[in-house]
Image: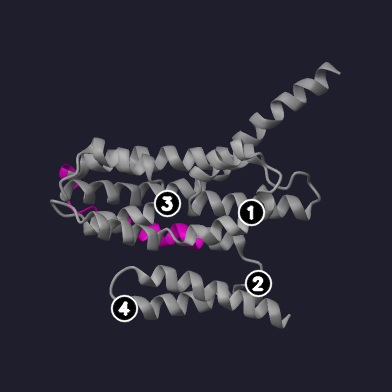
Amino acid sequence: MLQSAEARADAPRSELRRGVASSGPVLLGTIPYALVLGAQATQKGLSALELSTMTGLNFAGGSEFAAIQLWTSPPHILLIVAVTFLVNSRHLLMGAALAPFLRDLPRRKAFPALFFLCDESWALGLADARRRAADGTVPAFSLPYYMGASLAVYATWVGFTTLGALLGPVLGDVEAYGFDMAFPAVFLVLMRGMWTGMAAARPWLVSLVVAALVYLFVPGAWYVAAGAASGLFAAWLMASDA
């Protein structure tokens, strides 16, 4: 009985460690573009403290890159807020995809967990929940696993964006080293982990084409919302025809 109790007590810690370990490959790609953001922020006049506050409170890299690109002195607050909303609009779909797995989670646990929702933690958490559901594991969503992956990504992101801000004057133009390629590389790794076949990927293709066209012909960050909405609509149409 004592051994069984110890095993139950160790289970959350084991799942936490599993989440941290699974985030390793993603972290290797996160570090370079975190340094890029930090260096760009210093070029716009932000201090390391201001940047760490922004990345710590607004845990969403894409919108932070957009905000830095739009940063002026004084900043155009309404414009930055509007673009941040557009870039982060994909979180509505990400949350909807996770919702079935979070249904039985108490709100006092679900809401803090959702604060750490980003592309990386969402992809890792959703893929793991689907695997556990397919294996018949209950509950399918492992909160300790998700939090292990999320906290590892969060600490790495905030830490290395701050380091990038501190080293920015020394490093100069970090994009010259090819660090900016880490951003699409991370997403390719995440997509590979969620790949289930060409048929299921058709909404992704629709989203990609629409987002690319809007990016080319419409100013601003509308391509993010357009890509998300078109992908969702394509998935609905294909589900209706099935």
**Which range is magenta?**
169-188
Pointer 4: what residue?
A: 218
Name the N-terminal-most of marks 4 and 2.
2
Q: Residue at x 44, y 73 (%)?
A: 226
Q: Residue at x 82, y 16 (%)?
A: 2
Tell me if label 1 and label 2 are in contact, CB under 8 Å.
no
Name the N-terminal-most of marks 1 and 2.
1
Pointer 3: what residue?
A: 29
Find the distance from the CA under tag 3 to the CA under tag 4.
29 Å
**Relative to 118, 86 lies left or right:** left
Q: Which quarter of the image is occupied by the C terminus?
A: bottom right
Name the N-terminal-most of marks 3 and 4.
3
Find the distance from the CA under tag 2 to the CA under tag 3.
25 Å
- In this view of the protein, which residue sits in the foreground, 85 or 65? 85
* Kind of residue indicated by mark 1: Ala
Give the number of the disc on residue 197: 2
